[in-house]
Image (cartoon, rainbow, N blue to C red):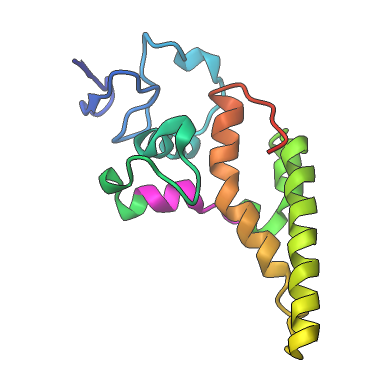
């Protein structure tokens, strides 16, 4: 049984970060020196993602949802920078493939909603931007986890 060196919380068998403080766990497949410069905020987000199910966690599906607090859920799905800057934030994080894919998906969804608004005679043009903003906000933290922790370079 392992415990966090910083806060003393019990660590999971394959946890890369402490569930309590986000401090990197030592002696695991992903040592703390493998992620130099990772801020405390990202460590907390990554710890919440691991509590949610790690690689299997998505903004719409969490294998361990019953074990998550409201704070954990917010850490997983809320990223203000991604909400405001969308694909540019993804480019900043080095995830250009995901930026292209999500931008194209957002454009398709916006086009479909725009056509539906025209057919139903409902003005939707004023808030279509929110679709892409929310999509980037919801996906950014898990996508960056997959890039930084799992070394994935995926399009989707």
Depth check: give the residue in front, 17 or 153.
Answer: 153
The N terminus: image quadrant: top left
Give the left or right position of residue 133, taking residue 117 as reference: left
- Looking at the image, which residue is at 30% across and 46% down? 68
Task: Please tell me whether the stretch drawn in magenta is mainly helix, strand or loop.
Answer: helix
Q: Quadrant of residue 97?
A: top right
Q: How far from the left and from the top, in percent, is residue 20?
A: 29, 35
Residue drawn at (38%, 26%) of the image: 17
Q: Quadrant of residue 54?
A: top left
Q: Residue at x 20, y 26 (%)?
A: 8
Identified at 36% across, 19% down, the residue is 25
Q: Please tell me which residue lies in front, 111 or 27.
A: 111
Residue 41 rendering spot, x and y as whole percentages? 47, 40
Residue positioned most to the front: 119
Residue 98 coordinates in the image, percent (x, y): 72, 40
Which residue occupies the extreme bottom position in the image?
121
Front residue of 80/87: it is: 87
Is 150 left, or right, of 21 in this rendering? right
Q: How many marks?
A: 0
Q: Is residue 53 above or below residue 115?
A: above
Please provide the residue range marked out in magenta. 72-80
Q: Looking at the rendering, which quadrant does residue 153 occupy?
A: top right
Where residue 6 appears, as percent x and y from the top left, is 28, 25
Indicate the quadrant containing the C terminus: top left, top right, bottom left or bottom right. Answer: top right
Q: Is residue 23 above or below residue 96?
A: above
Residue 78 lies within the magenta run: yes
Name the side, left or right, on which 69 lies relative to 96. Answer: left
Q: Is residue 68 magenta?
A: no
């Amino acid at each position: 049984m392992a415990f966090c060196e910083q806060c003393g919380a019990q660590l999971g068998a394959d946890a890369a970060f402490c569930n309590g403080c986000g401090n990197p766990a030592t002696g695991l497949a992903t040592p703390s020196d493998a992620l130099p410069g990772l801020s405390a905020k990202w460590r907390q987000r990554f710890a919440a993602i691991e509590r949610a199910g790690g690689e299997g966690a998505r903004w719409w599906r969490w294998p361990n949802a019953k074990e998550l607090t409201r704070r954990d859920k917010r850490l997983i799905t809320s990223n203000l920078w991604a909400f405001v800057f969308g694909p540019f934030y993804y480019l900043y994080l080095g995830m250009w493939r995901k930026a292209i894919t999500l931008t194209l998906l957002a454009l398709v969804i916006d086009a479909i909603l725009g056509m539906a608004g025209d057919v139903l005679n409902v003005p939707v043009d004023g808030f279509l931007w929110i679709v892409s903003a929310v999509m980037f906000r919801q996906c950014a933290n898990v996508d960056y986890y997959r890039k930084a922790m799992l070394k994935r370079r995926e399009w989707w």
